[in-house]
Amino acid sequence: MGEFELIDRFFRGVALEGAGEPSAVILGIGDDAALLNIKPGQQLVISTDSLVQGTHFPDEYSPDDLAYRAVAVAVSDIAAMAGRPLAFTLALTLPEVNESWLARFAAGLTAAARDFEISLVGGDTTRGPLNIGVTVLGRIRRGQEMRRQGARPGDLLCVGGPLGDGAAGLSVVLGESLPSSLDEADRAYLVKRFWRPQAQCGLGLELARVASAGLDVSDGLLADAGHLARESAVALHIVGAALPCSPALKRWPEAQRLEWMLTGGDDYVLLFTLPPASYERLDVWRSAGWPVSVIGKAMPGEGVWLDAGKGPERFDRRAGYQHFQGTKDV
Ligand code: ADP
Ligand code: MG
């Protein structure tokens, strides 16, 4: 099968008719490049992510989950800028042309394209070790983007959903030893959280001009909070007892749970700061169904501080989270 036939059979169908904003895509797959329409007063927001086999995903995977995850993690970066995703491109490197693999991969791509309301508008297909590169293009009204910089002392530190599920999900996927109380539904929930993360696009749009700073949690809460603290030149104080934890994650002993909530990556929930003038938005979001939690506060100073029950202690990347273990009731 040649490259053109492959693209026709498997990828042209992911160019969803009317996905997202109907007028956004002028020209999609099939020409030398795609054309998007950007309305006056808007700016493009662009993010690329690559998944490399052996580095970014386990060898035990199904092609549809892999495709979904590749799109979801790239879309999450657009949500983390408070942008609206419009379209995506796919740079796919394949060791071989395997039709059943490609059909399943395309099904996962289509599922993600539908869920995130974006259309596949182009890409590149080459031969080599398996590598999936996704670029998502989005838009945002000029000057309304949410950056990592901008948090001020007094702002509340908030997170858009439960933490630690990505790491727990990976543990389930890898078949590591699991708590006996973990039932089939918990397992399914966590595996889905790992393979099909739900980029928080709706919440991201709410945060435009409302949050003072923000990003998505991909490296782990403490590491990502560190990025925000550094870029905003504030200290971030986190209260361990306030960290949101899913019922499935609660099956693990506390020390493991805490480790994953603080340092496990792959959660793809939004982490942001809310200035006092916007505190009342919290109730609005919660009644709209967004599981937003206040987990701490920005203060004068620097670094990330965790109060795990014994008063605030500074998180040091080299010392790691072990420092906080052995504390109780967080
Ligand atoms: P060119 O040689 O001009 O770069 P290609 O043969 O690489 O063109 O691609 C032909 C068309 O197919 C282009 O519109 C390109 O964007 C699209 N395309 C190629 N690979 C993919 C892919 N993996 N997913 C989606 N579109 C693709
Ligand atoms: Mg090409």
Image (tube, rainbow, N blue to C red):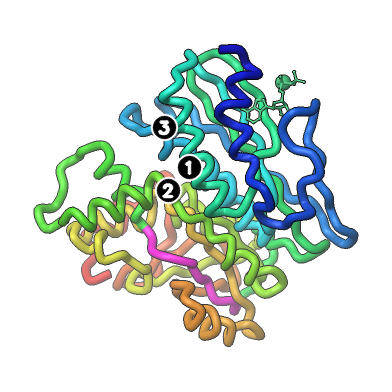
Check disc 2 and report its element: helix, strand or loop. loop
Label 2 with label 1: CB-CB less than 8 Å: yes
Q: Residue 226: image x %, image y %? A: 53, 55
In the picture shown, does residue 249 fall above or below 298?
above
Identify the residue under disc 1.
68
Asked if the magenta segment contains residue 155, the reply would be yes
Marks 2 and 1, how far apart at CA: 6 Å
Q: Residue 232 versus residue 148: which sits nearer the camera?
A: 148
Using the image, tell me which numbered label, if any, was put on residue 263. none
Q: Which residue is drawn at the image coordinates 38% and 56% (left, top)?
A: 262
In the picture shown, does residue 57 fall above or below 303?
above
Identify the residue under disc 3.
63
Check disc 3 and report its element: helix, strand or loop. helix
In the picture shown, does residue 237 fall above or below 5?
below
- Count of numbered badges drawn on the protein: 3
Q: Residue 158 versus residue 125: which sits nearer the camera?
A: 125
Q: Is mark 1 within 8 Å of ligand 1?
A: no
Asked if the magenta segment contains residue 305, the reply would be no
Q: Residue 209: image x %, image y %? A: 72, 72
Name the kind of residue labelled 3 in the image. Answer: Pro
Identify the residue under disc 2.
196
Name the kind of residue labelled 1 in the image. Answer: Tyr
Q: Residue 1 versus residue 156: which sits nearer the camera?
A: 1
- Closer to the chain start, of discs 3 and 1, is 3
Location of residue 155 (image quadrant) = bottom right
